Image (spheres, helix red, strand yellow):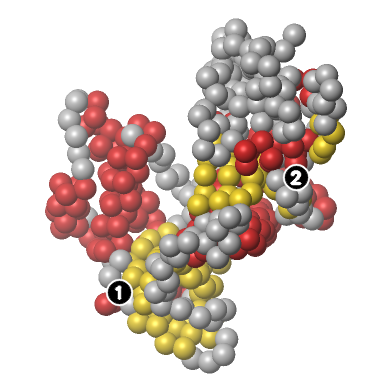
Amino acid sequence: MLSSRRYRLALSPEQAQMCEEFGKICRAVWNTALHQRREYRRRGAWMNYAPQCAELADAKREHPWLKVAPSHALQQTLKDLDRACRDHGTFKVRWRPKARWSPSFRFPDPKQIAVERLGRKWGRVKLPKLGWVRFRWSRPLGGEIRSATVSRKGGHWFVSFLVDDSHVTPEQHAMPNTAVGIDRGVKTAAVTSDGEFHDRSFITDGERSRYRRLQQKLARTKKGSANRRNTIAAMNRIMGRVTDRRGDFCSFIANRITARNAVVVLEDLKTRNMSASGSGTVAEPGVNVSQKRGLNRAILDKGWHRLELALANAARYTGTQVVKVNPAYTSQLCSACGFVTEGNRESQAVFVCKAAGCGHHAHADVNAAINIKNAAGHAASACGDLGISRSVKQEPVSRATGRTPS
């Protein structure tokens, strides 16, 4: 099984400068190749990896600065672009701007990578054109190296090894008859059908106030100035710590949940669509833009998509099956009797069934998590999701009576 091991590098000034240069060259190759692909598509033609790789070899003879970066790193950039264009479409792949892209490049040949341990806390790796580079030995490699990726984050350089850890996904979970539903929210990050609440704050009050001051300072700086670069670097250091805490939180609860349950049920949420801007256009301005902005910020802060990825990764080691269900009416459906109405959810945390003779009372997120668990394996609702694409003429139907609520 392939897994990743990331370590913080201790680069010399010369090596750090070389990594910066490699990253700039890879970014230029990406943007140039993407521009070429778009021009081909506008003419009704198609450009893929093989001809672009051949043209890259020709470009090296005309532009000597391309020879500074390792050849394999440039080829991997073209491979990444080819995959992105095939998965998302040529015109939906983003450019890599200088200000908002963190440099990274990959060495795919394990024969050119050598790792040695120097002591309890330090090791070193030999990479093409960089030579021997020291790194903090924070965890064992645990497998055979397949590739290495060098990247910069928050002012520090890291190396990520893709290793084969020799693990195999179990055919059956250790507790085969267990299942859990998870409701992801903006108030609490994750609530399970067992009644467990998983949440934490990823940024401290001091960091939040400092980040706000840095944003104000950034607005007063001149583009291209050293002061602006230093301000952005300080902001990235704060957000880097926040991102690391969010990743640690998601990995921790993902390992706990998958270790205890053979089936994990999630809502099939389109996080990117849900967190899209609500500003509209000049001709048709958006409605409740400030509220939508706050909702987008809360969705991204809780790390809904990152939790989903962490569950899928942890499930490989336990044999857990991750199932996605339609999210329609999970927050309005009574988990006890099946009655559906918008009034069932009295507030963010209170759920009281309005059906005659029921009166089921529960925490709204726990009730939704139970509905998500029960929906696994059932057909999707004909009404679709609760997004803006749902027809306003369709009404929810009670599972108990088979009629629309009055």
Q: Nearer the viewer, mark 1 or mark 2?
A: 2
Closer to the camera, 108 or 165? Answer: 165
Closer to the camera, 335 or 229? Answer: 335
Residue 269 in sight from this viewpoint: no
124 shown above or below 9: below
Under mark 2, the amino acid is Thr
Label 2 neighbour load within 10 Å: few <14, some 14-19, many 20+: some
189 shown above or below 267: below
Which residue is pictured at 33% across the width and 34% down the height? Answer: 89
Under mark 1, the amino acid is Pro
Q: Which mark is residue 267?
A: none
Q: Residue 96: x and y, percent?
A: 42, 45
Q: Residue 168: x and y, percent?
A: 41, 68
Quarter of the C terminus within the rendering:
top right
Q: Residue 72: x and y, percent?
A: 26, 64
Numbered disc 2: secondary structure = loop
Marks 1 and 2 in Cβ contact (< 8 Å): no
Among numbered discs 1 and 2, the one appearing first in the sequence: 1
**Residue under label 2:** 188
